Amino acid sequence: MPLDAARMGRVVLLLFLLLAAAPARPGAWLQEKDSAFTAASVAAFRNQDGSFDYKSSFYAEFGYRPNLTIGLDLEERQDLNGHALMFARIPVADFGQWGRFSAEFGAGAHHKQARAWALYKVTLSYGKGFQTGRGNGWLAIDAALENRTHDGVYRKLDFTAGLSSDRLLNPLIQVETAYRSGEPLYWKARPSVMIRAKDSAITWVLGLERNDARDDTGIKLAIWNRF
């Protein structure tokens, strides 16, 4: 087995052993005091030589106070590049059925192989729940400025929407975009399905990933856990 495939197998096995899952709302919603949410994922693309190009991530947030959620965002691509970011989220405005806004402030580091530099991020998020004939759902829009001090300032706009009914399968769509002055717009799209048996605490999120940096489609597995 190629080395990259072996590493990917170990990452997937670790995720299965460590994390169970429950649905979670992203973006503008804060965690209740003393509650926590974690998410882990791995995305893999198969190369022409049979090896795998993969990226793993881990995300956690904790309701430190009723109006303060703190968290950690980690991402790594085969020891080539990645980031570690600590953040704090506070509410900005709540318009009831019309949605809510929150603000998030983060600081950390990003790296390319053995070299690392500071990373700062400010995000304004909008979130809204909705109802359909197929069940309840949510949508979130996140607008961010991310200062990667070695690479420059990125303007990011992300969109997430999903349903959360009692069915075994529920759809989820995520679209991420990033732009840096003088470069083309970067985009990534992930249509997924959330798999959860009725009354089960476990949800698996399995999807496809497509981005403008590759001409093929990858597979992404995510696992969520709420405490």
Image: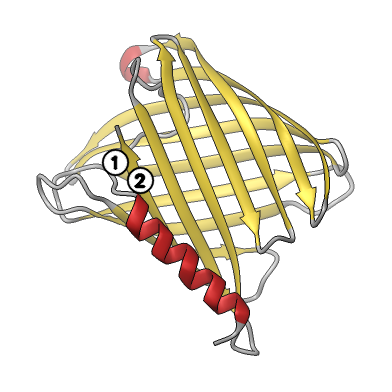
Of helix, strand and loop, which one carries label 1? loop
Left or right: where does residue 41 sit relative to residue 36? right
Left or right: where does residue 87 sit relative to residue 130? right
Q: Which mark is residue 224?
A: 2
97 lies above or below 108: above
Q: Which residue is mark 1?
A: 23
- Across and down, in percent, residue 106 comes to 65, 26
* Residue 208 visible in the displayed image: no
Q: How much space separates mark 2 and mark 1, taking CA atoms?
A: 7 Å
Few, some or many residues within 10 Å of mark 2 (<14, 14–19, 20+): many
36 lies above or below 50: above
Measuring 18% from the left and 43% from the top, which residue is drawn there?
165
Mark 1 residue type: Pro
Few, some or many residues within 10 Å of mark 1 (<14, 14–19, 20+): many
- Residue 15 falls in image quadrant: bottom left
Measuring 30% from the left and 56% from the top, which residue is drawn there?
204
199 lies above or below 221: above
- Across and down, in percent, residue 79 comes to 70, 60
Q: Which mark is residue 145?
A: none
* Residue 131 visible in the displayed image: yes
Residues tagged 2 and 1 counted as in contact (Cβ below 8 A): yes
Measuring 86% from the left and 44% from the top, which residue is drawn there?
151
Mark 2 residue type: Trp
Asked whether 178 or 32 is in front, the reply is 32
- Across and down, in percent, residue 156 comes to 67, 39
108 lies above or below 8: above
- Across and down, in percent, residue 212 comes to 67, 63
> Which quadrant of the rendered structure holds the N terminus?
bottom right
Measuring 44% from the left and 9% from the top, which residue is drawn there?
67
Q: How many marks?
A: 2
Dot 2 or dot 1: first in sequence order is 1
Nearer the viewer's eye, disc 2 or disc 1? 2
